[in-house]
């Protein structure tokens, strides 16, 4: 009886194991494509994404907006920082061992490289409400599922942000037409934006 129970437990894990393998394979493909982008492509496509973000009613209404510092050729949203300085409070994530802390942006001079070599604000922790969160990812699909880098930091953080609008941002090749592998632990976006399309 115990042996049968153990087999059933293992069988229940199979979809999760398969999803993990499929995610890893997709990460490899996407990361290679992203690293081949030229500076000109990054600038043009990032500008198109920023323009689409600006058109969102959720962004226009938002007082507090969390974004991310681009690494490894990610979509660059920093144009928002200068264009809306003084109009909105911008926040950046600070990644710890098992969690994300949020800190306000207070100028480039207050950014220093953190645990993963990503610039982070050297300001006190922000503990108020967040209206809109701009989320990076390795891949998204048209059902608004997301694959991140694999640490699970964003998924845990986003599940606690019940009132915030979650917007995934990516390049066009990162948006897959068919459903990408996902599990119950993966947090679905409210909106996904790429240079040519807004979904949600």
Image (cartoon, grey):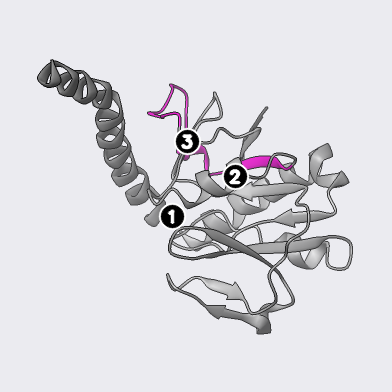
Mark 3 secondary-structure assignment: loop
Q: Nearer the viewer, mark 1 or mark 3?
A: 3
Query: Is 132 part of what is drawn in magenta?
Result: no
Q: Residue at x 43, y 64 (%)?
A: 97
Residue at mark 2: 158
Up the image or down, 26 lies above or below 90; here it is: above
Q: Residue at x 84, y 60 (%)?
A: 88
Mark 2 secondary-structure assignment: helix
Q: Residue at x 48, y 52 (%)?
A: 153
Q: Nearer the viewer, residue 25 or 195?
A: 25
Mark 2: few/some/many CA within 10 Å (<14, 14-19, 20+): many
Measured in 3D between alpha carbons, the distance from the residue under mark 1 to the one under mark 3, in whole angstroms, is 27 Å
Q: Quadrant of the N terminus?
A: top left
Mark 1 secondary-structure assignment: loop
Residue at mark 1: 37
Q: State the image quarter where residue 107 is shown.
A: bottom right
| Residue 137, position as x, y percentages in the image | 49, 46
Q: Nearer the viewer, mark 1 or mark 2?
A: 2
Q: Nearer the viewer, residue 151 or 27?
A: 151
Mark 1: few/some/many CA within 10 Å (<14, 14-19, 20+): few
| Residue 179, position as x, y percentages in the image | 43, 23
- Left or right: 87 in relation to 74: right
Measured in 3D between alpha carbons, the distance from the residue under mark 1 to the one under mark 2, in whole angstroms, is 29 Å
Up the image or down, 172 lies above or below 92; here it is: above
Residue at mark 3: 186
Q: Earlier in the sequence, mark 1 or mark 3?
A: 1
| Residue 32, position as x, y percentages in the image | 32, 50
Q: Quadrant of the C terminus?
A: top right
Measured in 3D between alpha carbons, the distance from the residue under mark 3 to the one under mark 2, in whole angstroms, is 10 Å
Q: Earlier in the sequence, mark 1 or mark 2?
A: 1
Query: Is 168 part of what is drawn in magenta?
Result: yes
Q: Which residues are magenta?
A: 164-184
């Amino acid at each position: 009886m115990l042996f049968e129970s153990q087999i059933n437990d293992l069988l229940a894990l199979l979809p999760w194991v398969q999803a993990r393998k499929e995610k890893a394979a997709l990460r490899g493909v996407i990361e290679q494509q992203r690293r081949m982008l030229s500076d000109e492509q990054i600038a043009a496509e990032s500008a198109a994404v920023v323009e689409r973000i600006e058109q969102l009613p959720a962004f226009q209404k938002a007082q507090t907006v969390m974004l991310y510092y681009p690494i490894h050729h990610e979509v660059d949203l920093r144009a928002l920082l200068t264009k809306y300085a003084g109009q909105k409070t911008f926040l950046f994530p600070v990644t710890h061992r098992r969690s994300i802390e949020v800190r306000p942006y207070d100028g480039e001079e207050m950014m220093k490289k953190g645990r993963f070599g990503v610039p982070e604000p050297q300001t006190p922790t922000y503990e108020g409400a967040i209206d809109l969160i701009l989320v990076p990812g390795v891949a998204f699909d048209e059902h608004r599922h997301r694959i991140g880098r694999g640490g699970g930091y964003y998924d845990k953080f986003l599940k606690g942000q019940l009132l915030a609008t979650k917007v995934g941002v990516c390049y066009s090749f990162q948006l897959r037409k068919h459903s990408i592998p996902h599990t119950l632990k993966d947090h679905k976006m409210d909106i996904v934006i790429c240079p040519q399309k807004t979904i949600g």
